[in-house]
Image: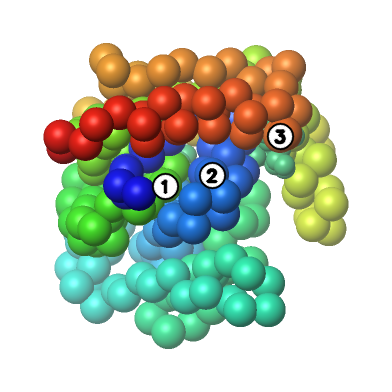
Amino acid sequence: MKKITIAIDGFSSTGKSTLAKQIAKHLGYVFVDSGAMYRAITYYAMKNNFISETHLDTAKLIENLPFVTLQFRVNEALGFAEMYLNNENVELNIRTIEVSRLVSKIAAISEVRAKLVEQQQEMGKNKGIVMDGRDIGTVVFPDADLKLFMTASTETKAQRRFDELVEKGQHVTFEEVLQNVQERDYIDTHREDSPLVKAEDAIEIDNSHLSKKEQFELVMELVNEVLQEPSEK
Ligand code: CDP
Ligand code: CDP
C-alpha cells in the first residue's frame, strides 16, 4: 500500500499528539512530536542560562545551536520514542510548566526554526510519517497528503492539560495552566516566522466534545479516503 504524509497542526493541548500517535500506531508509521524538539531546545537554553523568566540571550543561543543534537529514540519497553538532547534522555524535563512558559519565545527565533525544520523534513523524506506541531502543513510538509487543523475550546484545552500535569505529579493550579495555554496560543499565532495558521487545504476538527476514540475514528475515515486515492504525489 502507498505511504502518505500526515500533518497535524493546531492550538496547544487540542489532542494533536494523542491523535498523531493513534494514527501512526494503526498504520505502522513513524510518529514525530515536533513540539518536543522546541521544548528540548528550550530546556537546553534554560540549563545554560540563555533564557529565564526575565531575560533571553538570543545571540548566545544561536551561537551554540551547532552544538545541540536532538534525537528521538524508541523506548522498546514503553513502545514510544523519547527525546534525547546531546545524548541525554530529557523526556521528563521537557514536559514541565517551566519549559511550557518559555518555549514559545524560543520557537519564535528563526535560526531555531530553520535547524528544526531541516531535521523534520529529513525525517519525513520517505513518507509513512505522522507529525504534529504548528507549522507542519504550512512549512515543514506543504505537500502533505492529509492536513488536519485541531481546535478545542479554551476551557477544554486547559482542563485537559491540567488533568495531565496533575496526573504526572506536577504542582500546578488550573489558573496557571489556563494562562499558559492562552499565552502560548497568542505568541504562536502572532510570531513573524511560521505563525500558527490553518493551511488552506487543511481540514479543521474541533474535538471539544470528542473522546480520543471518537476523534480517532473520525480521522481514520479521512485517512482511508486518502489511502484509496490513486497515488500521484
Ligand atoms: O503539547 P502542546 O500543544 O502544549 O505543545 P507542543 O506541541 O509541545 O509545543 C510546544 C511549543 O513549541 C508550542 O507552543 C510552540 O511555541 C512550539 N512549536 C512550534 O513553534 N512549532 C512546532 N512545529 C511545534 C511546536
Ligand atoms: O499535542 P497536544 O498538546 O495538542 O495535545 P495532547 O498532548 O495530545 O492532549 C492533551 C491532553 O488531552 C492529553 O492528556 C490527552 O489524553 C487529552 N485528550 C482528551 O482528553 N480527549 C481528546 N479527544 C484528545 C486529547
Mark 1, secondary structure of its residue: strand
Q: Which residue is mark 1?
A: 130
Question: Residue 217 or 67: which is nearer the viewer?
Answer: 217
42 vs 69: above or below: above
164 vs 223: above or below: below
Q: Which residue is mark 2?
A: 23
Residue 176 in view of the camera: no
Number of labels in the image equals 3
Crowding at dot 1, Cα within 10 Å, few <14 / some 14-19 / many 20+, comes out as many
The residue lying at 28 percent from left, 61 percent from top is 123
Question: Residue 70 or 7: which is nearer the viewer?
Answer: 7
Residue 79 in view of the camera: yes
Identity of the amino acid at label 3? Lys
Q: Which residue is mark 3?
A: 212
Task: First in sequence, mark 1 or 3: give its number.
Answer: 1
Where residue 6 sits in the image (x, y, percent)?
Answer: 37, 39
Question: Residue 182 or 27: which is nearer the viewer?
Answer: 27
The image quadrant of residue 220 is top right
Query: Which residue is the extreme one toward the bottom?
Result: 87
Tell me: 68 left or right of 79. Answer: left
Tell me: 63 left or right of 88. Answer: left
Question: Residue 46 or 25: which is nearer the viewer?
Answer: 25
Crowding at dot 2, Cα within 10 Å, few <14 / some 14-19 / many 20+, comes out as many
Mark 2, secondary structure of its residue: helix
Where residue 70 sits in the image (x, y, percent)?
Answer: 36, 71
The residue lying at 41 percent from left, 18 percent from top is 203
Mark 3, secondary structure of its residue: helix
112 vs 222: above or below: below
Q: Does the beta carbon of the residue at mark 3 sit less than 8 Å from ligand 2?
A: yes
